[in-house]
Image (tube, rainbow, N blue to C red):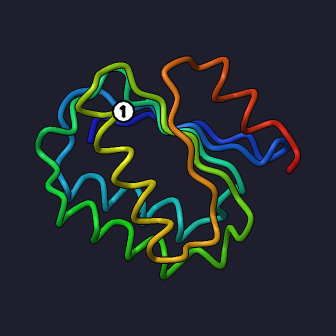
Amino acid sequence: MPVTTKVDHDNQLTIHTVTGEPSFQEGMATFKKFYEGNPTQNVLWDFRKASLARISSKQTEAIIDYIKHHAEKRVGGKTAILVSRDLEYGMSRMVQAFTKIKDIPLKTEIFRLIEEAIQWLSKDE
């Protein structure tokens, strides 16, 4: 997946900026690298220049199952998903729903403005 990752350990924030059309395999590779390392509490996925058209709902659920298996590393953490198009917004709502259904101890919110996403991530709750 064309992804650039920046990690700010002082602020417990990882920013993944995705471009193009990632495949399921590319997405899983990014998640594995993140969770097998030293994951931060907060994550921002920036999909403003990406299309999630190649990712199916079944594949999305598989990603969520992987996250659930590793969620103990980020209990109480937050994930902000930044989108600019309706398709990615809809896919992100599916992710948000799966995290609630599967009782994953992380908060997930969707944003269209980066300023709002950063503000939410930096708030103590």
Q: Is residue 4 visible?
A: yes
Name which residue lies at 27% across and 26% down: 86
Q: Is residue 5 visible?
A: no
Relative to 60, residue 110 above or below: above
Report x, y in % for residue 123: 84, 38
Q: Which residue is mark 1?
A: 18
Q: Quadrant of residue 37?
A: bottom right
4 sits left or right of 74 in the view: left
Relative to 21, residue 86 above or below: above
Report x, y in % for residue 118: 70, 28
104 sits left or right of 2 in the view: right
Report x, y in % for residue 57: 19, 59
Judging depth in this view, the residue of 71 and 11 nearest the camera is: 71
Name which residue lies at 82% across and 41% down: 11
Name which residue lies at 62% across and 43% down: 14
**Amino acid identity at mark 1:** Val
**Total count of labels:** 1
